[in-house]
Image (cartoon, grey):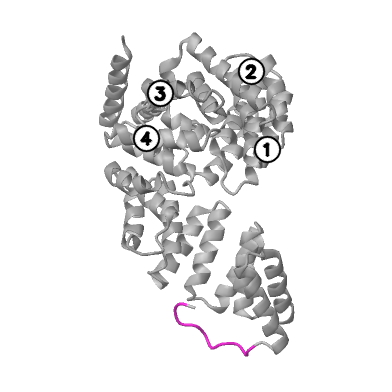
Amino acid sequence: MAGQQPSPAPAPAPSLQKLLAEGRDHLAAGRFEEAASRFSSVLASRSDVPEALFGLGVACSQLGRLQEAQEALRRYLRLQPSAADGHSALGMVLLMAGRPAAAKAELERALRLEPDSLETAKALAHIETGEYNGERAVGLLKPFEASPEFDEGARLLLAAGYAQSGNPGAAVALLSPLLQRQPPPQPEVFVLAAGSGSRAGDAAFAERACALGLRLYLNSDEIEQRCLHIVSMSFVRGLEASLHGSAGDVPVLILLGRLMTDIAETAEAPIRERGLKLLEQAAALSPSDAAVLYNLGRCLRVLAHPGEAIPVLERASAAHPNEELQALIYTQIGLTEQYLQHDARAENAFRRAIELNRRLARHMPEPAFSFYTFLVAVNKEQDAAAVLDEILRWDPAFLPARMQRARKLAETGRLEEAVEQAEVVARNTSPADQELLRAAHILLLQLCTKLGRTEEAARHQAWLKSAQAARRP
């Protein structure tokens, strides 16, 4: 344990020592139920065994029993108040519970007690990047960069810190070695790489990140949305040309179908319909593939063929996809039913989607945000507010949710807080997402005018005039 400790309690009896050893072994092997059982048995006989309290807290946190984890760790810290591991573990549990301010206080204390803890620094950097304090995240993680323990998660957080603090070139340099790593990196790597390359003026790197990410994560709206304004038509034409030698390449058919359906440059109806034909071709080749059916159903919805989309999506759901894809399928069903004005059916599908989303190790804010916008549309404001809070707990850096939070703060008269949230959106939204940028600057113009900040209001008005002029043919 780090820091000075009080005098140790008498050693547990041999039978309890055996339970402690078994608990340690189960914890190390990832058998968290068994570990929690052993540590609980120790504490039932003696409530003052620090190792059992700490082990129980860690095991319960891994099992999602966050209240039990907090209670065990707080009891541990009453016995060992200067234990860095306890403050760090409690901070991480509080972060999981959606209490970033309390988590930050515990993690800061842990890092003061044990400055060389990379895991604590990563947890703090996660909070800082969620709050768009990129410089602070860089300061936390830069000292660890040469460490052999500096893993992909740390590299991603450091890159996010660089991107947020106006140094996208440094983010590109950090992320470039990860793009073709095996096994493939997580989707966030490609999203951040594409955005950083674009901001750094490295169009070739941005397009390469998009191409790799899109091929690896065919169902990812997150990657596609970032890449729609980056991937060029030459990339789309090259993909289509590759089909001449391999007409049965189902992943390429899916990718082409998605891009031709969604990419802004190819909005002409014939090209969009060509995308639909390619997805139908993929479905003919793999008629029971859930990913193929999902993407075909999604395309049918986007092209306003809802009567055809629903049965295809239901077939996708019946094909036993994993929970992540199942959540995406139910979200598309919800969107389609919403288009058809079947509000009860839409809500049922959205609720099934978010329940699945909650069970994922990595939550997806985009489909949950579709549920939020539905709840707003049907005037279920209280439910909508709860979903918005949940999305921001999952991903504080998700800018569409931050924009909605800014609007809600403005509606309730909390103008200064609304300005702070809207400025985060305006500073960090990709230039390609003009709709979100414009919404942020309009709100900031209104807020700054109300607050008498005339210079800031003029700056936002100038941005809006410039953006309008750029849109004129």
Q: Secondary structure at mark 4?
A: helix
The residue indicated by pointer 3 is 238
Query: Which callout, 2 or 3, points to the residue nearer the camera?
Result: 3
Ranked by sequence position, the earlier of labels 4 and 2 is 4
The residue indicated by pointer 2 is 339
Disc 1 crowd rating (10 Å Cα; few below 14, some 14-19, many 20+) is: some
Q: Does any portion of residue 133 appear in the rendered image?
A: no
On the picture, is 350 further left or further right than 159?
Answer: right
User: Given the image, on which type of amino acid does mark 3 rest?
Assistant: Gly
Q: Which residues are magenta?
A: 2-11
In the image, residue 246 sits, relative to residue 129, either above or below, namely above
Mark 3–mark 1 Cα distance, whole angstroms, equals 30 Å
User: Given the image, on which type of amino acid does mark 2 rest?
Assistant: Tyr
- Residue 321: image tag: 1
Q: Is residue 156 magenta?
A: no
Q: Position of residue 299 (x, y in %)?
A: 58, 20
Q: Secondary structure at mark 2?
A: helix
User: Given the image, on which type of amino acid does mark 1 rest?
Assistant: Pro
